[in-house]
Image (cartoon, helix red, strand yellow):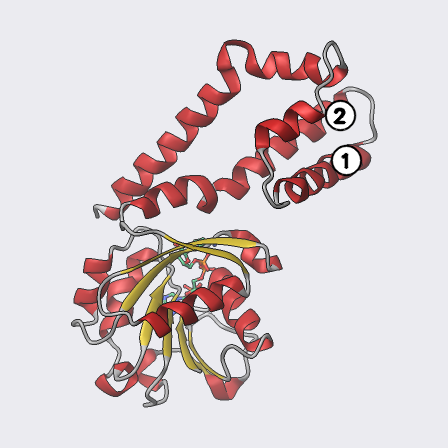
Amino acid sequence: MKALFIGYGRMGSALGDAWLRTGLIEQLSIVDPGLAGAPEESRFTRLEEAPEDAFDLIVLAVKPGYASTALAGLSDRQCSQAMVISVAAGVTLATLSQALDERCPVVRAMPNTPVLVGAGCTGLYAGGGLGEVQRERIGQLFAAVGQAYWVEQEGLLDAVTAISGSGPAYYHLFSEALAQAGAKLGLPTELAHQLAAQTAFGAATLQQQAHADFTELRLAVTSPNGTTAAAIEVFEADQKLRALVDAATTAAFNRSVELSAH
Ligand SMILES: NC(=O)c1ccc[n+]([C@@H]2O[C@H](COP(=O)([O-])OP(=O)(O)OC[C@H]3O[C@@H](n4cnc5c(N)ncnc54)[C@H](OP(=O)(O)O)[C@@H]3O)[C@@H](O)[C@H]2O)c1
């Protein structure tokens, strides 16, 4: 596939580098004014300088505020056989299609930062006009950087944002708190950090096993009257942790809806 990336920052480069490495795209052109690392022959500071090629894939990975103007600058030839993937958070399909003057099918993707290490989680939504083969190709692209899941209503991307888009930060916060608690209990800071990180990794690995059930996994390590039970009792008192997670994800969801409305 011949791809054009508009924006090659943190997210754009994580996707583009992985897709080149895995051979999912053969040719890459990049438009990004702030880019230093990419090979000069494929890097352009402005869209007007990019090749007049018929791209198979155009990836929009600029900050949401620049999304419409960036797309509107594409030529008819550049769009002629392309599918467009936008990772710009909160920019609706209607806005993207309008900016493109409906010249090509658009998919919205909501990836998260673990795509940087091939362990991402991406929610995908396509409007009309995307063929079955194109849908499969897009699924493969995001499967190359983790797991990909299609949603069938655009509004569900706000929920995906609240759970997996913002989710890595929630786990990092929990690890921060766990490491701090470990240090308070007398562990060297670095060791407390390692214990928190390795425990998160181990728990996530168990959760990824086929047919894993979160409640069963928790109960399996919670002997009556044991140490884990003592801690879980505190987390579960008045459903405190669950209420906090519910309130926090609702706040993220509402913010995502609010941003999409602008
Ligand atoms: N990072 C995440 O976890 C994540 C998750 C889901 C979705 N996203 C979405 O991904 C998009 C990019 O986020 P990011 O974290 O990768 O941001 P980023 O690191 O700031 O990357 C954006 C890049 O686009 C460049 N740029 C700005 N205006 C441009 C234009 N008109 N044409 C071409 N390139 C332009 C920027 O250059 P300058 O720095 O010089 O302005 C920058 O290099 C955002 O819309 C965000 O909502 C990110």
Q: Is residue 161 left or right of residue 215?
A: left
Q: Position of residue 159 (x, y in %)?
A: 36, 41
With respect to residue 243, does 238 lie above or below?
A: above
Q: Position of residue 89 (x, y in %)?
A: 35, 52
Task: Find disc 1 in the rendering and name its residue.
Answer: 195
Q: Amino acid at mark 2?
A: Gly
With respect to residue 207, does 7 lie above or below?
A: below
At horizontal 34% and vertical 48% (from top left) the residue drawn is 157
Q: Position of residue 257 (x, y in %)?
A: 27, 41
State which tag comes first along the sequence, 1 or 2. Answer: 2
- The mark lying in front, picked from 1 and 2, is 1
At horizontal 66% and vertical 23% (from top left) the residue drawn is 219
At horizontal 60% and vertical 60% (from top left) the residue drawn is 118
| Near-viewer residue (252 or 134) | 134
Task: Find disc 2 in the rendering and name its residue.
Answer: 182
Give neighbour class at mark 2: few <14, some 14-19, many 20+ (Cα, 10 Å). Answer: some
Tell which quarter ligand 1 is in.
Answer: bottom left
With respect to residue 193, does 235 lie above or below?
A: above
Give neighbour class at mark 1: few <14, some 14-19, many 20+ (Cα, 10 Å). Answer: some
Separation (CA) of disc 1 from disc 2 = 9 Å
With respect to residue 261, does 20 lie above or below?
A: below
